[in-house]
Amino acid sequence: MAGSIAASAFLPGSPAPATAAPKNGLAERPDSLDVRGVAARPGSSSSAAVRAGKTRAHAAIPKVNGGGKSALVDAEHETMPSSSSPAPRTFYNQLPDWSMLLAAITTIFLAAEKQWTLLDWKPKRPDMLTDTFGFGRIIHDGLMFRQNFSIRSYEIGADRTASIETLMNHLQETALNHVKSAGLLGDGFGSTPEMSKRNLFWVVSQMQAIVERYPCWGDTVEVDTWVGAHGKNGMRRDWHIRDSITGHTILKATSKWVMMHKLTRRLARIPDEVRTEIEPYFFEHASIVDEDNRKLPKLPDIEGATVAKYVRTGLTPRWADLDINQHVNNVKYIGWILESAPISILEKHELASIVLDYKRECGRDSVLQSHTTVYTDCNNESGQTTLHCEHLLSLESGPTIVKARTMWRPKGTKPQERIVPSSW
């Protein structure tokens, strides 16, 4: 009966298919009929049920004679078990979940928009793009190294300018990167491969720096450095810092270095193998022509000048103050030296030059004291009083660590404009 209705729904003009003869007497039907009214073959009940489910699903769409037959087919379809009537495979059912597809498209769009925003970003100041990563490069026929630094917010002081320690750290960083770029960096702090084999490392013995001006937050400075020979058993390293945009000189510095044995902590001669490594990179050019070679007294006491002495005791190194050679980094000494400088000088003057004479290394357990003697008996050309100070940093037990001399100028003094081209 159901099979005839389904067939007539799709083929309304065709006669109903003949039904098979009853086997169990008049008006009796076989136990199993397919959609065409034909008795199903044994063993094919599952496939017949699937085909019957599909036929009933389609038969529910058209309506014949006011929907009576369609309603009958719908009712019979609803009574069929879900396991025997799976959903028909149509084009729509094979599509992916639209909500997941929309979410994926949205994610891709947002990621692309963010990437485009980063690529299209342009700073308001073009100089901020100068050597952004600060890798540095070898210049001047391989004899000089150049690296740019951007002055960070945590590198400036109360005057909104970079501190002297910041500039000195830039000197040290370019020196090490110079050795690395030249392919001479061993496993030590600036040691060459031959030095590492012999447990040798460099220590600074003297340094002089002249500061023309102090850069501000966001400025980009360009640092050049090179090395040369110093006597028979030493090496000289020079630096020149300038503004990367204007070319104005910011700082010039020179230093002298000797070798120390890592185990004995004693000075050592330069082996011939090490000299062979470094001599091809020597460049005989002095950044400071008139070096301050005046001898630094132990405890300055000059009569006839206005002298004031200041002392700061109980200075101890922190763990972070040590470098990989297990002694205090040389830049840290500058901070300790200025600890004993009176606050009145720091507020009204800025450091114009500094000379450092390193006598011995400082270890982790050292306790130091800082002495500063201030002289106010010298005037500059403008009639303003300038200062120079003698400093002594020593262990509280007595031995001297560093001697130093500093020159100070009043804040706001405009230094002489000195422009040096980037290429020699």
Image (cartoon, helix red, strand yellow):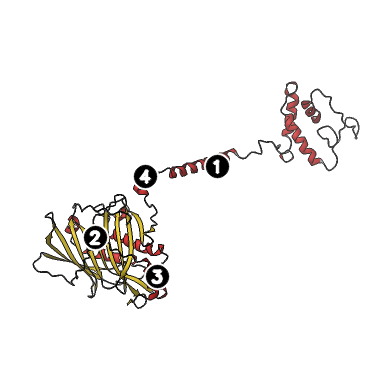
- State the mark number for residue 123: 4
Q: Residues within 10 Å of mark 3 (few under 14, many from 20)?
A: some
Q: Label 1 amino acid?
A: Ala
Pointers 4 and 3 in contact (C-beta within 8 Å): no
Q: Which residue is mark 1?
A: 104
Q: Label 3 amino acid?
A: Glu
C-alpha gap between disc 1 and disc 2: 61 Å
Q: Label 4 amino acid?
A: Pro
At a point 35% along the width and 78% down the height, the residue shown is: 264
Q: Which residue is the extreme one toward the bottom?
A: 264
Examine the rendering and report whether any part of residue 343 can be seen.
Answer: no
Q: Which residue is mark 3?
A: 277
Left or right: where 45 falls relative to 160: right
The quadrant holding residue 207 is: bottom left
Q: Residue 242: x percent and y percent?
A: 29, 55
Quadrant location of the N terminus in the rendered image: top right
